[in-house]
Image (cartoon, rainbow, N blue to C red):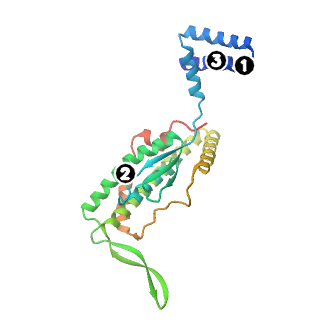
Amino acid sequence: MTSDKMLTRIGGLLRQAESTDNPHEAEAFMTAAQRLATAMSIDLTVARAHTADRERRPAPTQRVIEIGEPGRKGLRTYVELFVWIARANDVTCDVTRTSTQVFAYGFDTDIDTCQALYTSLVVQMVRACDLYLSEGGHRGAVAQRVVTRTVRGRRVRRLEDRPLATITARLEFQSAFAERIGARLLEARQETIAEREREDSAGTALALRDKDLELTDYYRSQSRARGTWRNQTASYSADARAAGDRAGRQARLGGSAELPGARARLPR
């Protein structure tokens, strides 16, 4: 018998000894546990802790993610990147009005994955955008902006082409980068789920359903958000978005431990 199995067996005997009201049964279970522990040279405290750790059920939690200082330009695109990553990792987000913080709801391991991916990808996003702007890829391009005018007493909204401003180019580039990352991660997630379902269709489906229900109940009980966050921009630039999308396709998603498909377990 392996050491792990022996620890579990001894811990089970200890639990039975501590849960029974019959003193004779308690003594019998404790004696059996002690004999096994002595034979394997295992401390009873270690066995008890091992069993408690194995039986500890993970529970959803909330974590505050600091995005940036108030007033910093482009924070909404940083939030958008984190939210896309979260969607692919079973994490639900609320966002402050200033886009300086994200409230992440999910299991610790999933939130850890989101933070690891975000830390790497936000640096890649900013560097790729800086390179795009420094090379002048946005010069001469146009941006479409919704303009409202009064025509014959009626307010009319229409699109107008304007020179692409640097700040607009940055926001559109980074927004498209975030969307492409989200699409890549969601695709990786679906591939992983499909692979696991081929191995154990019923078990995987049940685990995912139970996890989704537990997370939904937790979010509803904890969230105080009003409405749904969206990154809405006043202007649109096909050129900047195309460049951001290309950068998102080329971005490194990190090591295997950071990928959604690499998670070792689903909550029981």
Q: Residues within 10 Å of mark 1 (few under 14, many from 20)?
A: few
151 to the left or right of 69 = right
First reached walking from the N terminus: tag 2 or tag 3: 3
Residue 98 visible to the viewer:
yes
Amino acid on which the number 3 mark rests in the picture: Leu
Residue at mark 1 to residue at mark 3: CA–CA distance: 10 Å
Residue at mark 1 to residue at mark 2: CA–CA distance: 55 Å
Amino acid on which the number 1 mark rests in the picture: Thr
Q: Secondary structure at mark 1?
A: loop
Residue 122 at x, y = what percent?
37, 51
Q: Secondary structure at mark 3?
A: helix
Residue at mark 2 to residue at mark 3: CA–CA distance: 49 Å
236 to the left or right of 205 = left
Give the residue pinned by disc 3. Answer: 14
First reached walking from the N terminus: tag 1 or tag 2: 1
First reached walking from the N terminus: tag 1 or tag 3: 3
138 to the left or right of 107 = left
Give the residue pinned by disc 2. Answer: 122
Q: Nearer the viewer, mark 1 or mark 2?
A: 1
Q: Residue at x 36, y 61 (%)?
A: 173
Give the residue pinned by disc 1. Answer: 20
